[in-house]
Amino acid sequence: MYTQDELDNHANQLNPNNDAYWESRGYNERPDDWEDIVYGCEYDDDYYFDD
């Protein structure tokens, strides 16, 4: 059985919005252009989200 901390760490490593995701992939921290890297194009908040 896993502890809650282990489960949280696992979830964070699967979430590109979290530093743990990037650190587990060799980055020092989440890059400023992480959306472009994840989505493969220039990211535009207005296109994806309604205000």
Image: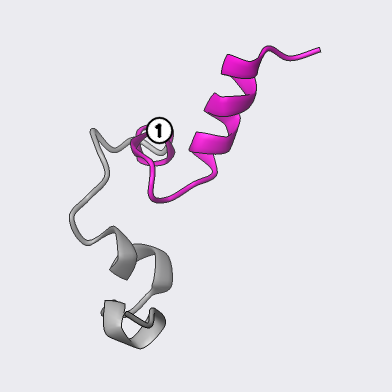
Residue 4 lies left or right of residue 19; in this view the side is: right
Residue 7 lies left or right of residue 26; in this view the side is: right
Residue at point 32% right, 65% down?
35
The C terminus lies in quadrant = bottom left
Helix, strand, or loop for circle 1? helix
Q: Residue 16, how many percent across, how many down?
A: 42, 50
Is residue 17 a member of the stretch shown in magenta?
A: yes
Residue 44 higher or lower than 32, as above or below: below
Q: Residue 25, how many percent across, how many down?
A: 41, 39
Residue range in magenta is: 1-24
Residue at point 29% right, 84% down?
46
Can residue 44 be spotted in the picture?
Answer: no
Q: Which residue is under mark 1?
A: 20
Residue 14 lies left or right of residue 25; in this view the side is: right
**Residue positioned most to the front:** 51
Residue at point 53% right, 26% down?
9
Residue type, mark 1 in image: Ala
Can residue 21 be spotted in the picture?
Answer: yes
Colour mapping used in the image: one colour
Q: How many numbered marks have been drawn onto this rendered protein structure?
A: 1
Residue at point 37% right, 83% down?
50
Is residue 4 a member of the stretch shown in magenta?
A: yes
Residue 9 higher or lower than 19, as above or below: above
Q: Tag 1: Cα neighbours inside 10 Å, few (<14), some, or many (≥20)? A: many
Residue 46 lies left or right of residue 18; in this view the side is: left
Magenta highlight: main SS: helix
